[in-house]
Image (cartoon, rainbow, N blue to C red):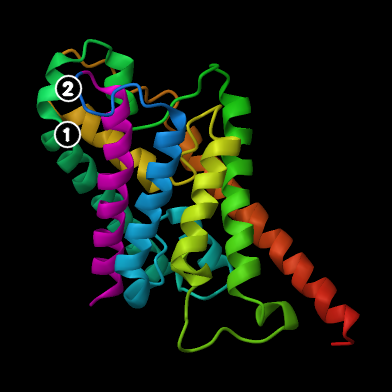
Amino acid sequence: MSPYIAEFIGTMLLILFGNGVVSNVLLKRTKGNDAGWIVISAGWGVAVYIGAFCSNAYSGAHLNPAVTVANMLCQELSWQEGGMYMIAQVLGAMIGALLVYLFYREHFEVTQDPDAKLACFSTAPNIRNNGQAFFCEMVGTFALILPIFLIASPSLMHGDAPSDTDPTLGLGSIGLLPVGLLVFGIGMSLGGTTGYAINPARDFGPRLVHAILPIRGKRDSDWSYAWVPVAGPIAGAILATAVFWLLSATENNSIGL
């Protein structure tokens, strides 16, 4: 399978399960209505597990432009390849969001709260302060990317080149269960401020679908905030990559390389 198709399918499944659990909890008259934040966090952990499981063998299971940017900075992907990964991720996220809407369409109809409807597509801060929200998204993504590097790439800590059999460092590179638990942990510990997008495609693609779909009683798509869950995760990925290479350089110096 093409890595780009794998990224498309993996991200589509990520959003289908991830935004699906949000819809199950927030929309009226569902079986999971008002089930709470723990269910949402657990659902997103499972969503990442499923998306990574289905795409890891073919693309490294990035499913996230922030992960792809980290790979490009480490020269494990060319900028052209990385750009194609990100396009596939956004398109997959859009189709996943469309499927969630079609699946829960009747429940969107009976839900009156326009903010809840938007939350089934994209994130928003509970306290409106874009600078603080940017910081939270940056730290949350840092807490995603750095563990991926540290667990998946011990050889790089000793200055070795990436293995030809594992050319990219994606979500699946640290093991499918650990990455699901990592995302679950980020949601439980760091998700209470912004809803932890930590993934530009996860937020931008579904937000665009929300803007396009003729959803009865919907609000605007909050484009004044939309830059935060894009720029914050990218900044977090850059920071995590810088810290990883600083640690690598320190390790190399300590062994006399």
What is the crowding at mark 1: few (fewer than 14 residues within 10 Å), some, or many (at least 20)? many
Q: Which residues are magenta?
A: 1-28
User: Mark 2 — residue?
Assistant: 108
Image x and y of residue 28, in percent:
22, 18
* Res 216 visible: no
Q: Main secondary structure of the magenta part?
A: helix
Mark 1 belongs to which amino acid? Tyr
What is the crowding at mark 2: few (fewer than 14 residues within 10 Å), some, or many (at least 20)? many
Q: Residue at x 20, y 15 (%)?
A: 111
Image x and y of residue 168, in percent:
48, 74
Q: Is residue 73 above or below residue 103?
A: below
Mark 2 belongs to which amino acid? Phe
| Quadrant of the rendered image containing residue 11 | bottom left
Q: First in sequence: mark 1 or mark 2?
A: 1
Q: Do the numbered discs 1 and 2 sit on residues whose CB atoms are within 8 Å?
A: yes
| Quadrant of the rendered image containing residue 172 | bottom left
Q: Which mark is residue 101?
A: 1
Q: Is residue 158 above or below residue 200?
A: below
Image x and y of residue 82, in percent:
41, 66
Q: Is residue 153 above or below residue 88?
A: below
Q: Residue at x 57, y 29 (%)?
A: 133
Q: CA distance from mark 1 to mark 2?
A: 8 Å
Q: Is residue 23 magenta?
A: yes
Image x and y of residue 99, in percent:
16, 42
Label 1 residue SS: helix
Q: Which mark is residue 194?
A: none
Tally the numbered discs.
2
- Left or right side of 252 for 203: left
